[in-house]
Image (tube, grey):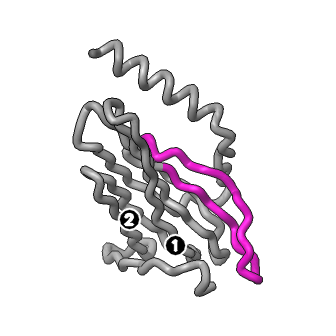
Amino acid sequence: MKYLLSAFAFTASVLAGCSGLKAYSDTSVKNLNVHTRTDSGSFLSSTRASLDIYGVNNTCQTAYQGTVILDKETRTIGLPAERPSYLVFRFESSSFLANSSGATNYDTLFTPLPGRHYDVDVRYIDGIYSVTILERITGDRKAYRIAPVELKDC
């Protein structure tokens, strides 16, 4: 079983590298901490999370900037302040025995403000997903929940 899981992990990493995804290259101040937890509920299935980032112009048109694979417990990302970004959190699951797969997305229009940091809690546990974005003013302990905004509300 150990070798089967190792082989699967290797195959998944090779396929991810060949998927054509562009890695998001952030040159901005690191202002977004993404905390991820995924658990498929079974050792015979797997779940992956990723974040697609799109820039949004003044006419609300999006341009793909890249993808961050959320394969670590915490990822720190830089998004440009005072510029809207369209964030698409993608949850992909697959089952080995049933030979099935599926995907679920959570998306929001998001504009980080200067002098603020954001914590994003990303979870996919037993088929239930949630994404929570909290805003913190630098030096303040309070956190404020950011409600999702649809792209059409740009």
As drawn, the residue found furthest toward the front would be 98
Asked if the residue at tag 2 contacts the one at tag 1, i.e. Cβ–Cβ closer than 8 Å, the answer is yes
Q: Secondary structure at mark 2?
A: strand
> Residue at coordinates 34% horizontally, 63% vertically from top-left?
130
- On screen, residue 44 versus residue 33, left or right, reads left
Q: Secondary structure at mark 1?
A: strand
Residue 66's tag is none
Residue 50 x %, y %: 50, 50
Q: Residues within 10 Å of mark 1 (few under 14, many from 20)?
A: some
Q: Nearer the viewer, residue 2 or 97?
A: 97
Q: Nearer the viewer, residue 43 or 133?
A: 43
> Residue at coordinates 62% horizontally, 70% vertically from top-left?
85
Residue 131's tag is 2
Q: CA distance from mark 1 to mark 2?
A: 10 Å
Q: Residues within 10 Å of mark 2 (few under 14, many from 20)?
A: some
Q: Amino acid at mark 2?
A: Val
Q: Is residue 108 above or below residue 71?
A: below
Residue 69 x %, y %: 52, 45
| Region rendered in magenta | 50-71
Residue 61 is one of the magenta-drawn residues:
yes
Q: Is residue 147 above or below residue 74?
A: below
> Residue at coordinates 44% horizontally, 76% vertically from top-left?
137
* Residue identifier under label 1: 108
Q: Amino acid at mark 1?
A: Thr
Q: If the image is split into quadrants, where does the N terminus sit?
A: top left
Q: Is residue 98 above or below residue 116?
A: above
| First along the sequence among labels 1 and 2 | 1
Residue 12 x %, y %: 49, 29
- The rendered magenta stretch, by its main secondary structure, is classed as strand
Q: If the image is split into quadrants, where does the C terminus sit?
A: bottom right
